[in-house]
Image: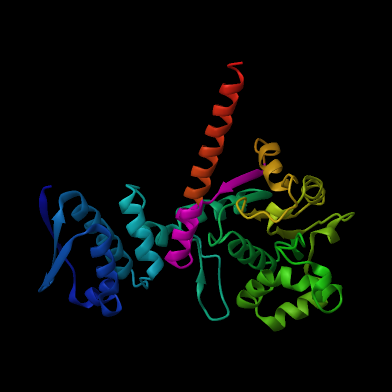
Amino acid sequence: MATSQKSLTIDNRLIQIIFGQFDKNIRKIEKAFGISYFYRGENLVLEGDEGMVESAERVLRDLLVIAKNGNEITDQNVDYSIRLASEGFAEKVSDLEEDSELICHTLAGRPIRPKTFGQKKYVEAIDKNMIVFAAGPAGTGKTYLAMAKAITAFKKGEVERIILTRPAIEAGEKLGFLPGDLQSKIDPYLRPLYDALYEIMGAEPFQKNMEKGLIEVAPLAYMRGRTLDNSFIVLDEAQNTTQSQMKMFLTRIGFGSKAIITGDQSQKDLAAGTVSGLDTALRVVRNIEGIAICNLSSKDVVRHPLVQKIVEAYEEYDKSHHDKSHHDKSYNGSRKNRF
């Protein structure tokens, strides 16, 4: 294994930003690529396996561009840059920071923009298409980005209403055993949508617009028989729709409307034997102009890095389980054909 050294010149004013608090960023890079480093004057020297040193240098140069542009270097920036370099992708986080659309700001002033290249394609698809399907695991920002786009379109006057809906499917619990009236029973299923609205729009403006009927948060069953014109519609948890529910929803969309359908195909709560409306729709509408399908993956997870590892572990388990089942069926079939 060839040992290599690389030297980077970094302004002393930027080194602390790049290294992070208590050197957490540089230590993360050191651990990820198995390299060592030392800093003298304005020279950062990396030492280790040649390929690993080149990858570490790429990450540090990526972070250097972000720092020079005056932007904050987040844990997500570091983790994603390491991932891109490790897997040999040409894209850089600094390019993403510069090119990505700023959707809006939260009430606290935090900018909302795509954090991965998968999310960037998703946001671009929303801009260009009337209907967008976003399928992917938890933590990829499917719902949150859709909500941000909906609120932005509403504030700009591009749509007259925001309609947010979910199928009220029990994830192991029964609605009838929950306390309160029907609305109280349904609210827990819609809570993630409320949370995003409060964070981006604020509780008081949300309540006022809801009272006026300009924002509606309701179970999917309430959509039946309606025509939704001039609206930004978000259907969340679409993997829990039946085929008839999905067809019903898609045929509600009227003139001047935009619809985003999000779902995680690995987390279905449907009764055994029920085919997911999302699974069917992704096959049925894939070639229709004006409809885009965005498949996000574990690479687009923007929650804690541990969430990304959990998603990947489940993906690997599901793959190996599927391969084993397929092998067992093939083996049993070949045995039957022998007689």
Figure check: 149 above or below 326: below
| Residue 246 position in % (x across, y down) | 77, 48
* 43 relative position to 16: left or right: left
Q: State the residue at coordinates (56%, 22%).
A: 334
Residue 182 appears left or right of 145: right
Q: Is residue 270 above or below residue 173?
A: above
Q: Which residues are magenta?
A: 290-314
Write the residue at 73% across / 68% down. 189
Percent from the top left, x then y, of residue 315?
50, 50
On whether residue 295 falls in the magenta region, the answer is yes
Q: Is residue 43 visible?
A: no
- Does residue 161 belong to the magenta stretch? no
Q: Say if 212 sits above or below 270 in the image.
A: below
Q: Residue at x 45, y 54 (%)?
A: 299
Residue, far top: 339
Q: Quadrant of residue 222?
A: bottom right
286 w.r.t. 271: above or below: above
